[in-house]
Amino acid sequence: MTTDFAATRALFDLPDGITYLDGNSLGPLPRSAAARVASCVTDEWGRLLIRGWNKAGWMDQPARLGDRIGRLIDAVPGTVVMGDTLSIKVYQALASALEMNPARRVILSDTGNFPSDLYMAEGLCRTLGAGYRLKTVAPEDVLSAIDDSVAVTLITEVDYRTGRRHDMAAITARAREMGTLTVWDLAHSAGAFAVDVTGAGVDFAVGCTYKYLNSGPGGPAFIYVAPRHAEAARPALSGWLGHEAPFAFDLTYRPGAGIERMRVGTPPVLQMAALEAALDVWDQVDLDDLRARSLSLQDQFIAGVEERIPGLTLATPRPHPLRGSQVSFRHPQGYAIMQALIAEGVIGDFRSPDILRFGITPLYIDQDDIARAVDVLARIMASGAWDRPEFHHRAKVT
């Protein structure tokens, strides 16, 4: 299958006059999502009422959509389930891994990891006590830091600020050699390029769906558990829908079979309706085509900025294998520059302390979008238009 990116672009409802380079933070609205959610509200919730759990298949959504995401990360059917938030799924995976490796007390992560993942790890260590601790090292030092003291690694495959990509296969192989379990955060991987959790031998993986998978703000997270751990991993957050028989209403928890035990609370039915529509887009996408187009657009953007705009420093690695699907530049006034860009209809975002971040999402951006982004950025920098008071005012969301 050859991907027709003009056809995939037509599947998104993009505002006129906007060049959207922030799909690595929040994907745009798939055209079919609004109608799908409306149908879920009026035809299912409205007409079926509580019968929708059975007649509309709401209770089966987490596993059904989990399998569809599983195809994007090369997970075998029945190993991915949806629901809750990414932070909850991180906590579940870490707690299960620590229980499975009881002689060790160290969670290893890196200083480029998303802070929420680190917060979850710190909180879990405080709860467990007994010498449990989080150890962080520089991203480039992760591989050498895996030793026989580490119980589990917690690594986000793509650095949310710089776009630097870890070598999943090498790190997982080293972890297995040292008797260490792995938890991979795929928030900036799933839908950005092909992921192979099976081939790499990953133990646990988690991810969100509102970035490259376009499920909308607050879209549900997913968790993957390798088949070899399916009956050994016990969820610390033992919610009623992870019970073997939720509607038996037992007073004692009994874990469900396999991945079902990683369910916690009631699934977000309306958000999953949006996700279902968003995943339809992927039925016509070849992930190798996606990766090739992403790298081509990244190269175009980097070359254009470096040729025309002095003063910006590339933060994203130059070698293709070390990149995710975003390009980041550094500038001391990065926040104000980004606000000026957004005011001109080129939407990226800013990450402290000095990162201008641009998501490269070939499903709905093309060479013309990249060229326009370079033109607008060059004009703003040459004119100093970014240095206006309103562009320095910090909003709650950057």
Image (spheres, grey):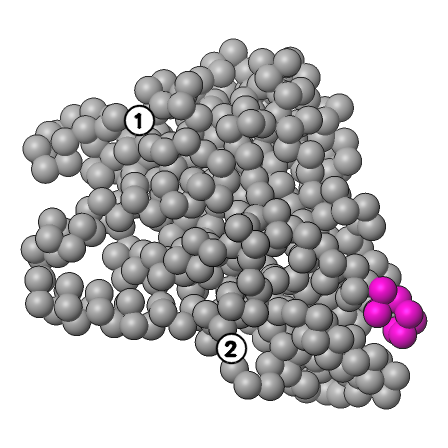
Q: Over which residues does the magenta segment extend?
A: 303-310
Residue 31 image-quadrant placement: bottom left
**Could you say where residue 39 lies in the image, as x and y percent from the top left?**
22, 69
Q: Which residue is mark 1?
A: 258
Looking at the picture, which amino acid does disc 2 mark?
A: Leu
- 190 is within the stretch colored magenta: no
Report the side of 244 relative to 233 (left or right).
left
Tell me the element at label 1.
helix
**Could you say where residue 240 lies in the image, as x and y percent from the top left?**
21, 38
Q: Please tell me which residue is depicted at 26% across the width and 48% down the height of the picture.
A: 61
In-front residue for pair 346/332? 346
Q: Earlier in the sequence, mark 2 or mark 1?
A: 2
In the image, is residue 42 above or below residue 204?
Answer: below
Q: Which residue is mark 2?
A: 14
In-front residue for pair 393/266? 266
In the image, is residue 344 above or below residue 325?
Answer: below
Report the side of 48 relative to 355 (left or right).
left
Tell me the element at label 2.
loop
